[in-house]
Amino acid sequence: MTQKAAEVATLAEEIRACRLCADRFAATATRHAPRPVVWFRPGARILVAGQAPGARVHASGRPFTDPSGDRLRDWMGIDGDVFYDLDRVAVVPMAFCFPGYDAKKADLPPPKLCSATWHDRVMKALGPMPLTILVGGHAHRWHLGTRGSVTDTVAGWRAHAPHVFPLPHPSWRNTHWLKTNPWFATELLPALRARVEEALA
């Protein structure tokens, strides 16, 4: 194992042991304990920068093991074997733990404490990759510094391609958005899939 690989492995273990948000999560409607989902190591070709694990990912311990993940892999044009190959794809969300639900069973946002504690360290440790895929507004704001709407950021994808592609969240909640923005499927996705293929070659 190289020195860099050892440093990243140590960082990953630190994150897995993190319990900074234990009291916060205990106070949510789900009353769950922290379970950081860590999925990265040096050498990956694609970085998927997401928002936070959902309830199913919290249970599985693997990123995007839910219908959102199925849709994301379809958008990328790859299957699960490729997506879960740590030598090819790294997944670094804005929060490593499931934030929980509020009293109305709506997803809580990723705690800022998580990104403030870990994100700079992880990005520095991994270094640049050929392709970064930004999933959702929280990732757009951190990585691109944008303050506009998700629609505006995604519509301006050509300004960031071919090395960065901002996407909406692949949640079922965005199905209406996909129907009202057909350019996403006809223009952005073919370019994304071609770039994914190039990055993995």
Image: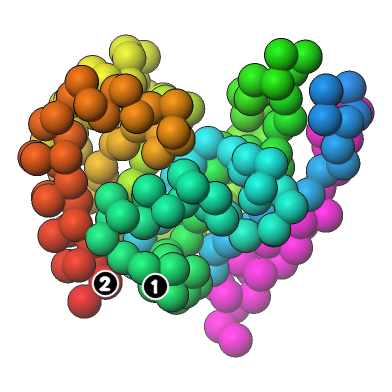
Q: Inspect this view and state whether residue 82 appears.
A: yes
Q: Estimate the x, y position of residue 42 in percent, counting from the top left.
A: 49, 70
Residue at 32% from the left image edge and 14% from the top image edge: 149
In terms of secondary structure, where does tag 2 sit?
helix
Residue at numbered disc 2: 200
145 up-or-down from 124: above or below: above
Q: Give the magenta-colored segment's residue range.
A: 1-25
Query: Disc 2 residue type?
Result: Leu
149 up-or-down from 101: above or below: above
Asked if residue 14 lies in the magenta stretch, the reply is yes
Colour pattern? rainbow
Residue at numbered disc 1: 82
Question: If you read the primary sequence from the N terminus, does the residue marked by circle 1 or circle 2 appear first?
Answer: 1
Residue at 54% from the left image edge and 68% from the top image edge: 41
Q: Is residue 54 left or right of residue 74?
A: right
31 up-or-down from 44: above or below: above
Q: Estimate the x, y position of residue 129 in percent, counting from the top left.
A: 33, 59
How far apart marks 1 and 2 lie (CA) works out to: 9 Å
Which class describes the residues within 10 Å of circle 1: few (<14), some (14-19), or many (20+)? some
Q: Estimate the x, y position of residue 178 in percent, counting from the top left.
A: 26, 29
Q: Estimate the x, y position of residue 116 in percent, counting from the top left.
A: 64, 32
> Disc 1, disc 2: CB below 8 Å?
yes
Which class describes the residues within 10 Å of circle 2: few (<14), some (14-19), or many (20+)? some
Which is nearer the eye, 87 or 84? 84
Which is nearer the eye, 85 or 60? 60
Residue at 26% from the left image edge and 72% from the top image edge: 200
